[in-house]
């Protein structure tokens, strides 16, 4: 008998990717995949990539999930706290939503509105000390997709004192699955194919999380919607504080991690190379003209940016090897 | 110690997918990945999706591959026969190229030119009797990508006498990876994005293979290049010979196969749902106006259409469960 | 003072393309662009490609449009008849919807439901005699997008007795704008990019129109949704009745038309080459194996398939040169 | 008899777009379209979007072009100077290449190598005083595609003293046609679809041109290849030097220009909205967290970024209205 896991909010894109990963995980047995409007429908009606799996969405309630060993919450922002409160403490929980990421209640209210549900252990194992913290936790807040890409690129440089935390400029482009599966005109294929467009410029709700996770004190983030289903490419620039080689800092930070890869000199990240994988590809240089450090990172927003990361956290919480059921190799071309 | 496998021609797209599958296969150990021009280069310089794998292309010669238990040949058409002839009979071989697919030497010469290398066991396990034949063979000719999609849609209907073999009309669209990794202007992203265009209309070299595999005696095939990296969608129409329900025929034919799925009524195949998987999705109906049977199939041309199929054949040849190391679930969206 | 034209239903994709063409038309002055829910909104909020045009959507009612010389109706199916009935006979009308295309009331009811509004002059000037009929009409039913692509490929061959009308097999793939601008999950960029999928297989509502326009008596149509914003590629196959060269038949049929081009031998149509243009590209051959005639046509579904065609019809109705304000050259790559 | 224009290097993407614009220009008559390897081939073999135009590539030599009134040079970098030197001074020349853009010979040599051919009048009419300078010139260096997008966003802010020129950070993504029509593996559709990847990070050859055109003294530019055929989206951030409203500065700078549009507040540029047009769409804000000014601009790299801009310059040089033969409206969706 394996470890019993449940997924709440399994009808979204992150939920579908969680189901795919759980199906391939050697230790996990799915006890329930829940949904709101899709409750009662076959999972394959929403996720045709899972054809062959005879599974029906259950309704989203605590009773359905209470006898799981671990539950993944892939709910809209603001819905995780209530459900989590109904689950016994013995049920481990990984929340893919934003509800429990921020330690700063004011920042939460400013960007999300409503009361702050309180911070959980922050689910980015590659941050110093965090792997052990996650392993000892029963409630983990999965890192947001932009935050994963940007934090892995930036946090070691700030921590090492190699760049100033005060003037970080980021432009990060995401594939459309990051915007979810709800039908909206601006997300239609007709609108996004052949198009690049920024959104939430100057005030994105992920800024406080990224500052908290990286130590940045001044951060300009411009998110861009890109014409591809998956992937985030984050270009992070910061001002060096000395002569430290950014590649050396990153190489040291990720020497022992299975999922974060500093590319060989001259190679730059491709989002397509991370599709379906839990990997993050990094490269860094110092700009000849401006002297700024430029770090570029690529992830799959549904992989290391959501479902893959969540399984990685779950593995740690359950005492399994961190890489169980996860791939570092993307499906490309 | 696992089963020792080698890949000749590992720098192409099918070769890259083979490496990815071999890396995730619990019984396979890679002994060599060979290439021509890329010999000596790191595999990740060509296949960035494999970052983290410290592997260098070897030169393509028989000595490098001779101590493998099984060798996959992913070489350009016409190059497999010579290399295979140099490998000891004890080395099992799966040829992803066209060299050994056709039993009809005249058809070979007409479409490919040059001498016919002779037919090997045809590597489509879902054909009647073929699973056992493959299990007993040491040389297997992997099915071509278009042939997989069309044969799985059509062969059971002809075999059951449900449709006439004399008037089959197929339009099949393929993603660009089916055209290979050689740099050609008409395959540039600028040319293919936003574009659909047919090619080799009226005389495609896969026609004799498809006729051999399906039993069709008259076949019109129009291949189309589609603006996506992976996937084949084949629309197969034929004239019914009686009142047989095509869905019932297909359901019976694939009742016991792990990779071929007849979709529920009303659902039609999506190529995206098969990306990265070894699955084939099928649906069928009878056209209200013309009375023709229409069957549509979707595969990943690099999965069930090439590398996945090859691993499935290798599993059978080696006495492993057919599904070892293969997924039925696609990476979508 | 130019010719006064109005557009009803200007917030959809065909409506936006009409506005673009009207802006570039040397004889047309726009009197009103109407919409339902968008009434009162700036046109550029919906159609950002028209930035710089200070235009607001009016409400859709007959009074707003009654003093135009010509009105384009780009309304949902079933809404044209009522509005047209309220417009004075002196106002010429081109209906881009399906309401007045079919002469067969039964076929209308079967596919669209509801009462049949009656047939108008059929708006495909390239059909024999139709250019004069359109020039003399005050009410014209614009051809449907699939019907344009298929009819231009097929009608001359049937008319010339070169192919049998009884066994026509068509697979036609369309870009996503053909499915409209309403927000639906299956049309999201995340769903369509990287995907091909058929829809309405075996019973598409355009079949009666295509049969009426081409003279086909037996027609199998499989529509496919393709991962691109614009374009239709139709593959039409039929059984030859003699030795007529299909290229010669098509060359003769379109010798004097400005928008339909038979490509040089060996060249096959690309949808991208027609983007933004009112052109149709054709090629034909006889299949070596089956003996079937294969004709492939490419159009822009919003161009020759909708708005371009509508302007062409309007030009004829108003006594202008057929090509006024229209381009035969696509925006590619 | 119209104005006689020629195009040298007409087989590339910018060359094809020039031909399309010339065909639609009411005053231009094409005297020759030249190419190297394609000399003698029909233009439509390379540019299928021009089907219907019975035109053959001439060889690229000065004699062919010497009796034109104006010649567009769309040649590879380094080839313009020699050809231009052979043309009589009476022939006006617009060079779409980089040869004559830089005033700083050292910067030229550092990024391009070889001797500096000398600067021509800089072809960006929207810069202060430049419209008159272009009108009076016989040799004009067309602005580079990235430089157009970035300069239009940044130059007015530096000129007005609204931002510091010393710390400008730009991330700019381009569609694949910006990389040209030469067949290269990394530009294959299989490689670019679904992928974002930066290139020439930290040392792009366009940096000196952008600094010269904008007045920036410190500039970090990260170019990104995006999965679309056309379009540049430039995100430009800079440090404000006071309280000037960046929107007000941009509105004033472009109040009288026909092609540059500051969008209404809340709307952000879409590259798709500029496809096929000569327009530039701009929006600006001040980042809540960092206080940086963020300006985003979108152009069509082949339109305002190359061929459209070249026609605009030619119009000015020839005393025609600036907008002749150019559209501000894009082909979208």
Image (tube, coloured by chain):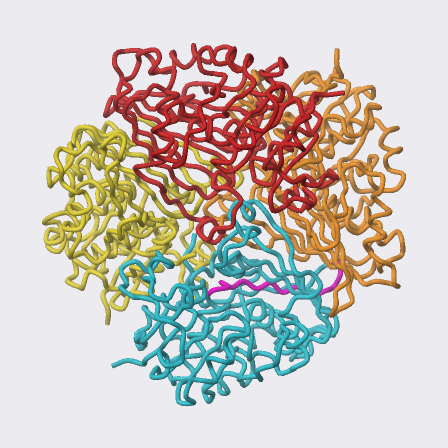
Chain colours: A red, B orange, C cyan, D yellow
Q: Is C110 on the left or on the right of A140, as rendered?
A: right
* The stretch drawn in magenta includes residue C295: yes
Q: Can the viewer see residue C208?
A: yes
Front-most of residues B89 and A117: A117
What is the quadrant of the N terminus of chain C in the image? bottom left
Quarter location, residue A58: top right
Percent coordinates x, y for residue C149 in the rendering: 56, 67
Q: Write down the region rendered in magenta.
A: C289-302
Percent coordinates x, y for residue C215 in the rendering: 66, 78
Q: Does C129 appear above or below A183?
A: below
Percent coordinates x, y for residue A123 in the rendering: 49, 21
Q: Does B288 appear above or below B133?
A: below
Quarter location, residue A277: top right
* The stretch drawn in magenta includes residue D65: no
Q: Can the viewer see residue D54?
A: no
Front-most of residues C221 and B199: C221
């Amino acid at each position: 008998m394996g470890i019993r896991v449940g997924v709440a909010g399994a009808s979204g894109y992150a939920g579908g990717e969680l189901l795919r990963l759980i199906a391939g995980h050697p230790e996990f047995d799915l006890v329930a995949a829940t949904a709101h409007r899709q409750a009662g429908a076959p999972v394959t009606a929403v996720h045709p990539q899972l054809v062959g799996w005879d599974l029906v969405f259950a309704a989203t309630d605590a009773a359905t999930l209470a006898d799981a060993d671990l539950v993944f919450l892939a709910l809209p922002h603001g819905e995780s706290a209530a459900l989590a409160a109904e689950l016994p403490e013995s049920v481990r929980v990984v929340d893919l939503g934003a509800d429990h990421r921020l330690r700063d209640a004011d920042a939460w209210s400013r960007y999300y509105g409503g009361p702050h549900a309180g911070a959980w252990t922050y689910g980015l194992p590659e941050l110093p000390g965090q792997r052990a913290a996650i392993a000892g936790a029963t409630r983990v807040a999965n890192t947001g997709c932009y935050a994963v890409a940007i934090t892995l690129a930036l946090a070691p440089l700030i921590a090492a004192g190699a760049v100033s935390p005060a003037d970080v400029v980021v432009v990060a482009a995401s594939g459309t699955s990051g915007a979810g599966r709800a039908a909206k005109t601006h997300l239609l294929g007709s609108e996004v194919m052949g198009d690049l467009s920024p959104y939430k410029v100057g005030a994105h709700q992920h800024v406080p999380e990224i500052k908290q996770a990286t130590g940045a004190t001044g951060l300009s983030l411009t998110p861009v919607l890109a014409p591809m289903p998956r992937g985030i490419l984050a270009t992070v620039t910061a001002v060096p504080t000395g002569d430290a080689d950014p590649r050396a800092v990153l190489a040291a930070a990720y020497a022992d991690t299975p999922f974060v890869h500093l590319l060989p000199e001259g190679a730059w990240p491709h989002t397509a190379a991370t599709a379906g994988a839990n990997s993050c590809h990094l490269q860094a240089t110092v700009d000849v003209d401006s002297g700024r450090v430029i770090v570029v990172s690529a992830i799959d927003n549904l992989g290391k940016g959501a479902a893959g990361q969540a399984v990685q956290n779950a593995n740690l919480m359950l005492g399994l090897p961190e890489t169980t059921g996860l791939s570092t190799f993307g499906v490309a071309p």
